[in-house]
Amino acid sequence: MGDPAVLAADLIAEGAPVAIGLDLPLGLPRAWAAARPEPGFPDFLRALPENPAFLQVSESLDTVSPARPFYPARGLRGMTRAAHAAALGMAGPEHLSRLCDRATAERPAGAPVFWTLGANQSGKAAIAAWRDWIGPALAAGAPLRLWPFEGPLAALLRPGVAVLAETYPAEAMRQLGIRFPGSKRAQAARRAAAPALRAAMARLRVVPVPALAAAIDGGLGADAAGEDRVDSLLGLLCVVSVLDGTRPDFIPADPWVRRWEGWVLGQTALPRPPPPPA
């Protein structure tokens, strides 16, 4: 794909409205954001290039703070999300999560934004995208708009602008009615899911070019990037389903979601309530 800033600029230059789904967090948890001076997440990102220390991952809890919340850089004995939350001054680990990170009746929970270790984490993707592309682009006045912070998707789409929206493969799978017989990290599972993927594309009137059709039928490759390819396809189909009205452009009527936490495109299920205290 190359430099995402170049890709976005090239797409904008084609003259049509542009919507880009990103498999990474666009938003920050309300328990952290409550102490921030900015009015919302887009303004925070715009100022982020002036605060590079925020994105440095802490090796240990000794250096974790609201000003440097990402953790851990590597596995450590006794490492827990409860200790991470405590180091950030939060009352418990549930406060590390945004509303859209929590489990729903339709899918399991996603990882908290600030967590950077293991397969179930999204912190490293957030750091890379915010540091290397979105923050500098917004600071430089690039024509990017962030859904849902700046309004509904259709209202933001216009020529000369790229709208960025968060997608989540586990959510997109449920939206599209796709199941993998086993882990989607395995080529065999991806190959077995090819008919369901092709059927979802047909329902959305998405016609794959021959190379993509062949790749889907072959499980999107035998290498480790096969999972990334299928996640990209799921995210793309999620964006298409909202653009053509198959899925609603739902945004909870929660001011924290709309200003700071963000939401997952196409998600309509509200999270399960957190468990009662022990």
Image (cartoon, rainbow, N blue to C red):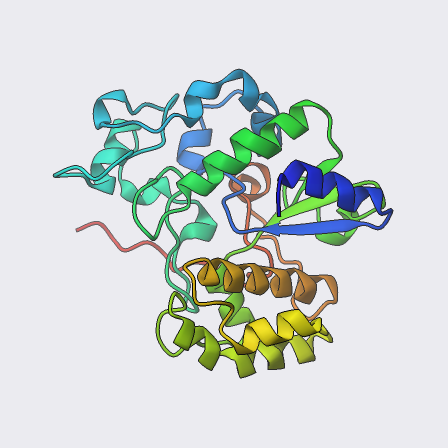
In the displayed orientation, state which residue is furthest to the left.
77
Q: Position of residue 260 (x, y in %)?
A: 54, 37
Give 130 or 132, whichever is nearer the viewer: 132
Determine which quarter of the picture holds residue 201.
bottom right
Q: Is residue 139 left or right of residue 25?
A: right
Q: Is residue 40 visible?
A: no
How many circles with numbers are drawn on the protein?
Answer: 0
Residue lying at 51% horizontally and 41% vertically, measured from the top left: 261
Residue visible at 47% across and 20% down in the picture: 52
The reply, left or right, for residue 86 in relation to residue 233 is left
> Could you tell me which residue is drawn at 70 percent across and 38 percent down?
6
On the image, the x and y values in percent for residue 254 come to 55, 46
Vertical position of residue 1 compared to residue 134: above or below: below
Seen in the picture, residue 191 relative to 17 is either above or below; the reply is below
Judged left or right of residue 136, residue 182 is left
In the image, is 166 to the left or to the right of 106? Answer: right
Q: Nearer the viewer, residue 90 or 182?
A: 182
Above or below, 27 relative to 154: above
The residue shown at (79%, 43%) is 12
Residue farthest toward the top in the current orientation of the protein: 50
**In the rendering, at what x and y percent does residue 262 appear?**
55, 44
For the question of whether residue 82 can be seen, the reply is yes
- Where does the image place residue 189, in percent across and percent down from the top left? 41, 76
